[in-house]
Amino acid sequence: MSGPHIERPDLPEYLTWEELGQLPEEIAEQIELWEGRVVWLRRGPSEHQTFTNLLWSALRRCAQADMSNRTERCWGVTTETNVFLGASGKSDFLTPDFLVHRCLEHAYQDIRATDTLLVGEVLSPSNSQTDMDAKRARYAKAGIPWYWEVTLERETSAIAMVRAFALETTHGQLPPGVHPLYPANYLLTGKWAPKDSAAIEIQFPFPIHISWSELEF
C-alpha cells in the first residue's frame, strides 16, 4: 500500500474494529489489527503500487480464462483488501497487496481467510524481513493455501523475483522434544526472475502464465 505520508497519531496498543472505524480514513487505512493489536503498514514508493496493480491485472486475466474454461469455478481478484482471519469478528485482519478469493455470495461481503486462495505481498526496501516473516506466519496459520512474495530491484523500476509458497500443514520428522515454531508453514514451490525465465508459470490455484512484458513499469 502506498500514498502520501501522514503523521501517525498516538493510539492505544489495541483497538477494536469499531474503534478503528472511528479514526480518519487516511489513518485507518494504514493499520492492520493483529488480534486487536495495532500494526502500522509501511508505505512504499510508487513502484510498489504500480507492480501491485500490474500483478492484479495479470492474475485477473488468468482467473477469467480459467472461469471461461470451467464455468463451475468463480474467482475474484483484488488489491489491498482486508482479509479477516477468524470465522467471525473483524478485529483480526491482514491487508495483502493482492489476493485471489472465491466469489462471495453477497455484494460488499467481508473476505475471510477461508474464502481466500492466494495472497501476495510486494516488498519495498522499507519492509523488514522480521515484519514479513511474521505476516507470512499469520497467513499460514489462517490456512490460506498460497502465498506470493514479489521482490523489487533496488536500483531500477523492475521486479527482481517472484516466489510462490504453498501451505504445508504437516512437518517432517524432528528430533525428540523438538517442535515447529508455527503449526503451519509455507514451502517455496516456485521462483521466477526476468533474467532466467520467460514468464511466471504455475498451475495453482488455477493455470497462471504471466510474461515479464506484462509486468513492465
Image (cartoon, rainbow, N blue to C red):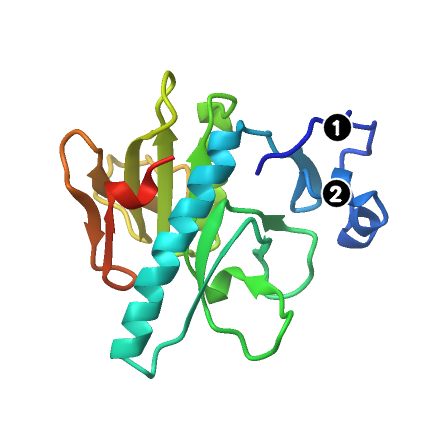
| Image location (x, y in percent) of residue 194 | 21, 33
| Residue at image coords 21%, 59% | 203
| Image location (x, y in percent) of residue 128 | 49, 23
Q: Quadrant of residue 202?
A: bottom left
Residue type at tag 2: Ala
Q: Quadrant of residue 74?
A: bottom left
Indicate whether 133 appears above or below 210: above
| Image location (x, y in percent) of residue 63 | 34, 65
Which of the two residues, 99 or 143, is positioned nearer the viewer here? 99
Which of the two residues, 63 or 174, is positioned nearer the viewer here? 63
Indicate whether 126 appears above or below 53: above
CA gap between label 2 and label 1 equals 11 Å
Classed neighbour count for the residue bearing mark 1: other residues with Cα under 10 Å, few (<14), some (14–19), many (≥20): few
What is the secondary structure assignment of the residue under circle 2?
helix
What is the secondary structure assignment of the residue under circle 1?
loop
| Residue at image coords 70%, 39% | 37
User: Which one is in front in this view, the residue at disc 2 or the one at disc 1?
Assistant: 1
Which mark identifies residue 6? 1
In the displayed structure image, the side of residue 210 where residue 61 appears, left or right = right
The quarter of the image holding the C terminus is: top left
| Image location (x, y in percent) of residue 213 | 26, 42
Q: Is residue 145 visible?
A: no
In the rendered image, which residue does mark 2 sit on? 28
Q: Could you tell me if the residues under marks 2 and 1 are in contact, i.e. CB atoms within 8 Å? A: no
| Residue at image coords 47%, 38% | 50
Residue type at tag 1: Ile
Which of the two residues, 52 or 145, is positioned nearer the viewer here? 52
